[in-house]
Image (tube, grey):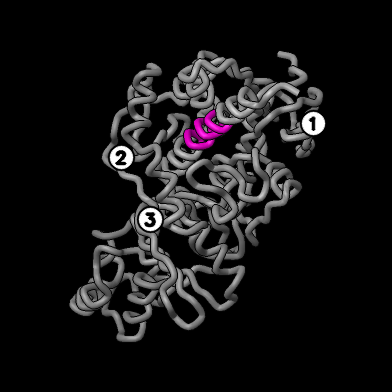
């Protein structure tokens, strides 16, 4: 589809946030019977790559309970203000009306009944078209320039498909996670060119961690166990905790518990070289209970005590690392070393799998630079934001999608409200 020379609203990015902003902008214009023209442009050759891979291809649309405590980045109060504008109930209703029924799983995650992310993407694209918004892709946006002419302002958006003049812009270009999907961080440069600052640093979030070469965990690839991870500062202060399933990989650790704490670890490492990440392999058992069980083993050895709690491969490795006999009596010092290894083993993290594997981005445009009731820039009037380009990232479980839906709704409806006000003012001006 060719790019028009001009339109009223230009949406940069046609991922989850951009499509949702487009849908609600188009609907808001229809409700007001405003003849507004709207175009969404996206870098990707195939739209919705991140939607299609989410939740293992099933798309975890949201979570049954969402609040600001599920997010990091900007202040909880600011995040709460946006989330309250479009909640979980509204998301469920939207998708039901769009032909996608959602189901709640034991974890609280909401998935389409179809178990197919394609049904979610297809619904979003249908509703975008029904709302009267054109989607042009692939069309990378090279620059956005603010223009003023008399009493009116607008933007010149330069894309690979040509230039387009727009009255208002919604920047929903994503962060830097999964760059092959099109979210390669270019939106950050566009925001900065229009006067915005970016948080420092910008890091991967929801990303697997890499452990030192030769560490025994790397030999346990494929093993999944429930754990508790604790991040402490150099002084021993607890900074963050995460509990849930952990997956051992040939490079280190992954799984929900690891992904959730990864952004906190990477941010802390940036600021505090002395911080530590500890793993508890048996969060359901206290250190005292474990030591008592080992002390009362009566010649059965550490392996027999651990077998009921952890997989055999892990039990053997832990006993070996602690110098604890797998059979026979357990001396005092090896017993204590084994308890420490199980309950608070330091993880020798040497890196992460990077943005190409990360499911989200930590950092971006601060919410302090955005008017939360409209998602409009405080620094560049006419520019609105939605989604991952902002300094908000949620834990695993559909929370980043919920942020996309909520911020997209506010940006889309508010941009149209502002355009409607502009139209009224223009109509009220006496002819020259």
Cα–Cα gap, marks 3 and 1? 38 Å
Give the residue at mark 3: 69
Closer to viewer: mark 3 or mark 1: 1
At a point 33% along the width and 70% down the height, the residue shown is: 326
- Quadrant where the N terminus is found in the figure: top right
- Magenta part of the protein: which range? 408-418
Q: Nearer the viewer, mark 2 or mark 1?
A: 1
Numbered tag placed on residue 302 in the rendering = none
Question: Alpha-carbon distance for marks 2 and 3?
Answer: 14 Å
Q: Is residue 10 visible?
A: yes
Task: Look at the image and tell me whether residue 49 can be seen.
Answer: no
Residue at numbered disc 1: 158
Residue 129 placement (x, y as % from top left): 55, 15
Report the front residue among 430 and 18: 430
- Residue 64: mark: 2
Ranked by sequence position, the earlier of labels 3 and 1 is: 3
For mark 2, give the secondary structure.
loop
Q: Residues within 10 Å of mark 2 (few under 14, many from 20)?
A: some
């Amino acid at each position: 589809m060719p790019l028009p020379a001009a339109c009223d609203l230009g949406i940069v990015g046609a991922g989850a946030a951009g499509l949702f902003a487009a849908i609600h902008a188009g609907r808001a214009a229809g409700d007001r019977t405003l003849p507004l023209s709207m175009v969404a442009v996206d870098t990707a050759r195939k739209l919705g790559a991140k939607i299609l891979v989410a939740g293992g291809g099933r798309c975890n649309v949201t979570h049954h309970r969402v609040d600001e405590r599920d997010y990091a980045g900007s202040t909880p109060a600011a995040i709460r203000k946006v989330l309250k504008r479009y909640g979980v109930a509204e998301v469920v209703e939207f998708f039901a009306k769009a032909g996608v029924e959602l189901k709640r799983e034991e974890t609280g995650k909401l998935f389409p009944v179809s178990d197919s992310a394609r049904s979610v993407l297809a619904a979003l694209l249908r509703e975008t078209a029904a709302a009267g918004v054109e989607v042009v892709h692939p069309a990378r946006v090279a620059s956005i320039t603010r223009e003023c002419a008399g009493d009116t302002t607008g933007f010149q958006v330069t894309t690979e498909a040509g230039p387009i003049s727009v009255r208002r812009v919604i920047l929903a270009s994503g962060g830097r996670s999964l760059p092959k999907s099109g979210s390669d961080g270019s939106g950050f440069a566009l925001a900065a060119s229009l006067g915005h600052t970016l948080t420092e640093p910008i890091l991967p979030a929801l990303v697997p961690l890499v452990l030192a070469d030769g560490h025994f965990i790397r030999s346990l690839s494929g093993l999944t166990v429930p754990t508790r991870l604790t991040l402490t500062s150099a002084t021993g202060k607890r900074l963050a905790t995460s509990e849930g399933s952990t997956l051992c990989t040939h490079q280190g650790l992954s799984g929900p518990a690891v992904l959730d704490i990864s952004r906190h670890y990477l941010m802390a490492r940036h600021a505090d070289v002395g911080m530590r990440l500890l793993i508890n392999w048996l969060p359901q058992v206290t250190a005292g209970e474990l030591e008592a069980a080992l002390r009362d083993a009566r010649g059965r050895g550490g392996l027999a005590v651990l077998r009921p709690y952890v997989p055999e491969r892990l039990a053997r490795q832990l006993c070996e690392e602690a110098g604890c006999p797998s059979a026979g009596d357990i001396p005092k010092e090896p017993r204590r070393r084994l308890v420490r290894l199980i309950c608070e083993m330091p993880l020798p993290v040497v890196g992460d799998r990077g943005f190409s594997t990360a499911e989200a981005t930590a950092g971006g445009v601060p919410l302090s630079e955005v008017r939360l009731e409209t998602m409009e820039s405080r620094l560049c009037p006419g520019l609105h934001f939605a989604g991952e380009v902002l300094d908000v990232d949620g834990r695993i479980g559909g929370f980043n999608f919920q942020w996309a839906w909520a911020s997209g709704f506010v940006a889309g409806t508010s941009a149209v409200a502002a355009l409607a006000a502009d139209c009224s003012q223009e109509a009220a001006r006496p002819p020259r």
